[in-house]
Amino acid sequence: MADIKKLNRPTKERMAMLRGLASSLLWEGKLQTTVAKSKSLQSYVEKILTLAISTYEDTIKVEKTEVDSKGVKIKREVVNDGPKKLAARRKIMNKLYDIQEQRKPKEDIASFRARTQDVNHPLIEKIFNVYAPKYAQKNKETGKAGGYTRINKLGKRRGDNADMALIELI
């Protein structure tokens, strides 16, 4: 069996592979891969989620003044990331690939653009807006942190007899 930590790859290749697997797992919610890769991926993803959970509430409300087409100044309240959340967001962006939103089947271009207009990094937004509040609530209820992923063993792969597993977010 391959060493779980190294996966028989040089560091750059291993980190690129983990970035890709983690991005896919966080975007799709589940992923089928080998047992060794899933065990390495589990610790990688749990660290990312823990960082997001600990900082997702750090926001600052700021008033911005904008000028519309008629020259009228409009004050608008905007919510920005606080310093801890911004640092965490940048760290997470460094650990994942930027997956872009895809058009849904039978969705026209205008509605797709309207839906994705204000989102620059959909995967990062999903982590902070969907996963972090969900798992923070779970942590409060159970009194424990961690355990955001689950590995289910599937059996042997047909071609090379490798042990396969399904890793999913709980």
Image (cartoon, grey):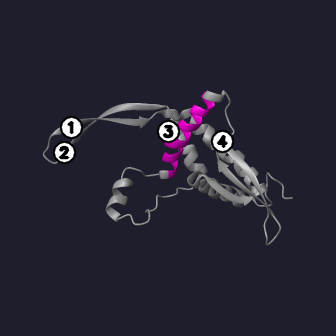
Nearest to viewer (mark 4 / mark 3): 4
Magenta stretch: give its range: 123-140
Q: Crowdedness of circle 3 by 10 Å Cα count: few (<14), some, many (20+)?
A: some
Q: Give the labeled residue for mark 4.
A: 148
Three-letter amino acid code of the residue under disc 2: Asp
Q: SS at mark 1?
A: strand
Name the image quarter holding residue 113. Answer: bottom left
Q: Crowdedness of circle 2 by 10 Å Cα count: few (<14), some, many (20+)?
A: few
Q: Give the labeled residue for mark 1.
A: 74
Q: Position of residue 20 (x, y in %)?
A: 63, 58
Q: Nearer the viewer, residue 121 or 71?
A: 121
Disc marking residue 16:
none
Q: Give the labeled residue for mark 3.
A: 86
Q: Earlier in the sequence, mark 3 or mark 1?
A: 1
Q: CA distance from mark 2 to mark 1?
A: 7 Å
Three-letter amino acid code of the residue under disc 3: Leu
Q: CA distance from mark 3 to mark 1?
A: 27 Å
Three-letter amino acid code of the residue under disc 1: Ile
Residue 118 vertical position relative to residue 76 in the rendered view, above or below: below
As drawn, is 89 to the left or to the right of 41?
left
- Image point 78% across, 66% down: which residue? 157
Q: Earlier in the sequence, mark 2 or mark 1?
A: 2
Q: CA distance from mark 4 to mark 2?
A: 45 Å
Q: Nearer the viewer, residue 2 or 28?
A: 28
Q: Position of residue 68 (x, y in %)?
A: 19, 45
Contact between marks 3 and 2 (CB within 8 A): the answer is no
- Image point 57% across, 44% down: which residue? 91
Q: Give the labeled residue for mark 2.
A: 68
Magenta span contains residue 139: yes
